[in-house]
Amino acid sequence: MKNLVKALKRCAVAGAAALAVVSLQPVSNAQAAPAPVVGGTRAAQGEFPFMVRLSMGCGGSLLTQQIVLTAAHCVSGSGNNTSITATAGVVDLQNTSGRVQVRSTKVLQAPGYNGTGKDWALIKLASPITTQATLKIATTTQYNTGTFTVAGWGSASEGGAQQRYLLKATVPFVSDATCRSYSGYSGLVASEEICAGFTAGGVDTCQGDSGGPMFRRDAAGAWIQVGIVSWGIGCARPNAPGVYSEVSTFASAITAAAATL
Ligand code: ARG
């Protein structure tokens, strides 16, 4: 099972090479009509201005105008890197007039990342994206509860195609104890990962959503990022929540690392 989890965690790497390829994997869990993220709906243009699509087939969020926060498993290491294109400003990735596309200059993968926990990375852009709002990160655990919003251009069903239009969904917090009790989740790193999803499944992030934010409203009504899409056993299956990097745990490290880029 450990290898299966690792394989799933690295899904974005495979997705990078085959962005438009529809997987032949069967959907092993037929359940309530998989509407389009799984079980989501279309985001409105401008609704989540901080959302970024990365060319290797991952999501991300604008930490600053010139730095994208994503998942460590979406990148291959740290250093100068001009191979990634970030697309922002549109829900429709094919909207060539509305979109802003900027190349990367550097990547910083979380120090100590080894495939378990610590699933965060930063991508420095060649120029700032000045037209889009950034997303602030949670610096305390106080928002690690409640209902979260997730969004991405990843699969709308397990094994399904990447999406042209940004999808969104809401998922409830799942405690570490409950999350760890599910088959395949015993390796959960409770201090570094936060789970979300419905016991019955049906709504979840999926392949290609990795690196994107999980967020909610703070006390002042502003969006605040509490998670980064990391892994799960399949997508939207019952008793198999999505696992997200726990942003509050890494907030200081993220901010400090960003200052070095
Ligand atoms: N690892 C996947 C990716 O690279 C994300 C998987 C999220 N899975 C889930 N069931 N929430 O895109």
Image (tube, rainbow, N blue to C red):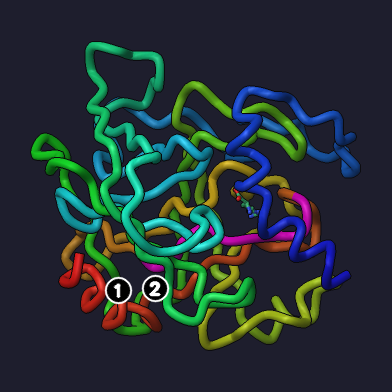
Query: The residue tagged with tag 2: helix, strand or loop?
Result: helix
Quadrant in which the C terminus appears: bottom left
Task: Give the quadrant of residue 51.
Answer: top left
What label does residue 254 carry, if any?
Answer: 1
Specify whether 106 is left or right of 36: left
Q: Residues within 10 Å of mark 2 (few under 14, many from 20)?
A: many
The Cα–Cα distance between marks 2 and 1, rounded to whole angstroms, is 9 Å
Residue 39 can be seen in this image:
no
Q: Is residue 70 magenta?
A: no
Specify whether 195 is left or right of 239: left
Query: The residue tagged with tag 1: helix, strand or loop?
Result: helix
What secondary structure is the magenta-colored segment mainly? strand
Label 2 amino acid? Val
- Classify 189 as above or below 219: below
Q: x, y (%) of residue 21? A: 70, 24
Quadrant in which the N terminus appears: bottom right
From the viewer's side, name the closer residue of 171 and 125.
Answer: 125
Specify whether 185 is left or right of 54: right
Q: x, y (%) of residue 198? A: 67, 59
Q: x, y (%) of residue 245? A: 50, 70
The answer to whether the residue labelled 2 contacts the one labelled 1, judged by CB atoms less than 8 Å apart, is yes
Q: Which residue is mark 2?
A: 247
Label 1 amino acid? Ile
The span shown in magenta is 226-234
